[in-house]
Image (cartoon, rainbow, N blue to C red):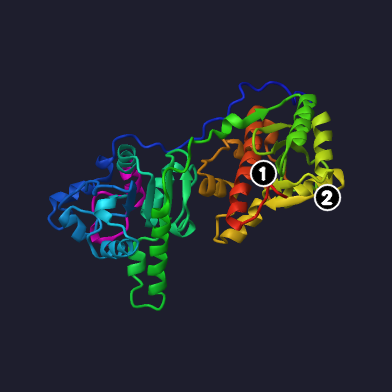
Amino acid sequence: MVGFFASSGPLTLTTPRRREPGLLPKCGACKLCEQSRDPKFPLNPKMPVWGKGRRGVLVCGEAPSREEDEQNQPFVGKDGRLLRKCLNQIGVDLDRDCWTVNAIRCRPSKHRAPTANEIEHCRPLLVNAIREHQPETIVLLGDAAVSSLLGWLWAEEPGGIGRWTGCRIPSQKLNTWVCPMWHPSHVKNNEGKRDYGLMERTLTEHLSVAFALKGRPWNPVPDYRKRVRIIMDPEEAAGAIDYMLSDFQGPIAWDIETDRIKPDHPDSLIWSCSMCAGGESISYPWHGAAKKRTLEFLRSDVPKIGFNARFESRWVMAKHGFMVRKWVWDGMLAAHVLDNRAKTKGLGFQAFAKLGFDAWDGGVSAYLKSKGGGGNTPNRIRDCPLPELLTYNALDSLLEYELAMVQAKELGVDLKGG
């Protein structure tokens, strides 16, 4: 492997592309506000933020209804009255205790849902409201609110509210709790049906959980990237592994990067490895003394944390002929136990939903995708700048460790005690 340890530039992770809104909304492109010239449509375009916000909570809905548009105030229509009823049951006054705003400030015509472009164009108004009022908790009601804020906070497409309802996201970017839940209109539309009472109680319960949160999620906001240590030299990496093992007081998370999904092909390779015991996360190429010391660790009774541990286990068995000993936690299995909704089990979703940490691949994931099927087709890991790959690898282990601690607490497991 000629040039494997060659310098590839600064040890920094490429900043992922993100849809950062400007400070000005794109009303000229959206043109919803121009409907105010037609008396059949909005009377009060660009509805302002409403409320006193005494409890530091910002509530974001979808778009003004006709009744709300006429009064130039959010949540005074039939859906808003249901929201106020649910809040009154937990001792919250919407106008006194919250700031209220909509993902779309102007009323769309014909009682339709906002379009993706309208949400994109109006997003700066929501971001500016958050920057101005600095809420400790943000309640997102429905698809449009989720699309607007999570589409900015997260580097991936958030999808619909069904994926997020009930989550309490400790956003690191905002240092604010973000709590998505069903819009009252979703509940109201089921009035008279058998499940209506359950849906109303669920909305009230989710609101109760959000309003029970006190203060900001982080003090201070963690900087995970500063806990990453990249080690190119295999002897130095072996020494760092020895130090970590001599000092550990609980399980160690570890993760590998490979040149394809499956290890069955004779040319398949483990390319790098990382380990984290709760403090620093080290990463290093899979080579020499570092590789040898890692294999000794994998044979040992030191408790181990993984995420989809079957992947690492299969690779170690295929390439080195033994089963990894003493797995004590698999973050993907724990995610299934805690919440079995679709599209919520990946490390990217879990790291954002549970730790408030945004995508960290910096473009590395593109190198890890294979062209063709079957899992034995090689990817482009050889073309990836090694420092960026190792940073990505180290953050994987760090996040797997931190996520395991959160999951274990939710499940009532003393993970550090073994």
* Residue that label 2 marks: 323
Whether residue 375 is visible:
no
Image location of residue 206, percent across then percent down: 42, 60
Q: Is residue 283 left or right of residue 30?
A: right
Q: Residue furthest right?
A: 321
Mark drawn on residue 298:
none
- Label 2, residues with CA under 10 Å away: few <14, some 14-19, many ≥20: some
Of 323 and 259, nearer the camera is 323
For residue 24: magenta? no
Of 83 and 164, nearer the camera is 83
Does residue 226 sit above or below 25 in this rendering?
above
Does residue 362 sit above or below 171 in this rendering?
above
Image location of residue 309, percent across then percent down: 72, 50
Q: Is residue 416 left or right of residue 22?
A: right
Q: Residue at x 32, y 55 (%)?
A: 62
Q: Which residue range is magenta in the image?
A: 104-124
Whole-number angstrom distance, CA of label 1 to CA of label 2: 26 Å
For residue 112: magenta? yes
Image location of residue 203, percent across then percent down: 39, 64
Quadrant in which residue 258 is drawn: top right
Q: Residue at x 61, y 43 (%)?
A: 402
Whether residue 351 is visible:
yes
Q: Secondary structure at mark 1?
A: loop
* Residue that label 1 marks: 370
Of the 4 image quadrants, the one containing the N terminus is top right
Of 218 and 292, nearer the camera is 218
- Residue kind at label 1, given as amino acid type: Ser
Decide which of tag 1 and tag 2 comes sooner along the chain: 2
Quadrant in which residue 233 is drawn: top right
